[in-house]
Each structure stands twice: as structure tokens, then as C-alpha cells.
Amino acid sequence: MDDTKAKYYAVRDEKASLILDNWGDAVNHGFIQKQGHGNAVKFNTKKEAEKWVKHKAFPMTASSAVKSYIQKQHFLVRLAVFSLLATMSLSSGFYMLVKLENYLNCRNDVIIGSSSVCVSLRKVSITISGEFNKLIDIILYEVIGVVLIFSSWVVGLL
């Protein structure tokens, strides 16, 4: 194999460093994930790669470690996490709406009809309250689905 035409993939982390001459092996050892953090580089010569792997690997930050972990998970697990976060965001939004209504003392203003902001807040609150039973049902179904997905994932069905 001619050293000038060969490609060497150097991959490093806190535990070990590798020099690979096969793209498939490099991918299996996390080349793509580590490349974004400066811990995987392609070289034309093995000598360059050997020099590079002698240096200590860059540490992964907490956010990049979480991102890397999430990217490895099954699609349904990511979907379940997203739906739970969306539901929690909507619930906290409704909670903030009620808090804002109380802060502005809108209960008295709606009766008097003096504040258009309070009237609008009250309309939104009444609309959401009217559909509250449906929202509870959706949340219940979502929780059941998430539990099924996570349990399937834990036992290895996904």
C-alpha cells in the first residue's frame, strides 16, 4: 500500500487513541461524533497520524456529551422525550398565564371590563379550561406511551 495515497483516520478519547486505515472501522470507533470536538482527524501519512494521537484528547463538554448520547438513542425514545418536554412547556405556559392573570388582578378587571389585556387573557384561559378534560386525557395517553417506549427500550426491544 503506497503511504502517500493511503488515508489514516486517527481517533482519540480520554482512554485510548487509535490509528485506522479503514473508513468503516473509523466510523465504528466514533470518528464522526468525535470529529466535531477535535478528537478525530484524517491524515495522508501514518507518521502524521502517530504524531497527532500522542497529544491528549479534548474533553467533551456536558452539553456535547448529552447531544452525543441522545443521537445514539432510538427514534421513538427521542420522540417520547420531545413530547414530554413539549407537554411540560405547555403546562408551564398555562401556569404562567394563570399567574399573570392573578398578578394583573384580572378577575376584577374582567367584571368591570377596563383592561383589554385581561379580557384577552381570560378568553384564552376559558378556552383552555373548557378543553381541560381532553388535555388531561392526552397527557395520560402520552405518559402511557412514554412508559411503554422506555420499558421496550430498556429490555432491548428497540
Image (tube, rainbow, N blue to C red):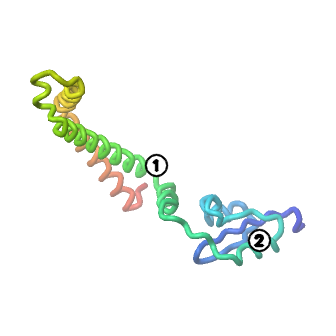
Q: Residue at point 24% right, 27% down?
A: 117
Of tags 2 and 1, which is closer to the observer? 2
Q: Which residue is mark 2?
A: 49
Task: Specify the amino acid type for callout 1.
Answer: Phe
Task: Specify the amino acid type for callout 2.
Answer: Ala
- Badge 1: residue crowd in 10 Å (few <14, some 14–19, many ≥20): few
Q: Would residue 138 appear left or right of 112 to someone viewing this image?
A: right
Q: Residue at point 39% right, 57% down?
A: 153
| Looking at the image, residue 86 lies above or below residue 65 | above
Residue 141 is at least partly visible in this image? no
Q: Would residue 75 appear left or right of 141 to someone viewing this image?
A: right
Q: Residue at point 32% right, 44% down?
A: 89
Which residue lies most toward the front here? 114
- Badge 2: residue crowd in 10 Å (few <14, some 14–19, many ≥20): many
Q: Which residue is mark 1?
A: 75
Which residue lies most toward the top here? 113
Instruction: State the image coordinates of residue 92 (x, y, percent, origin top left).
Output: 27, 44
Instruction: State the image coordinates of residue 56 (x, y, percent, origin top left).
Output: 64, 76
The quadrant of the image that shows the C terminus is bottom left
| Looking at the image, residue 122 lies above or below residue 76 | above
> Residue 151 appears in which quarter of the rendering?
bottom left
- Tell me which label, 2 or 1, sits earlier in the chain: 2
Q: Nearer the viewer, residue 4 or 94?
A: 94
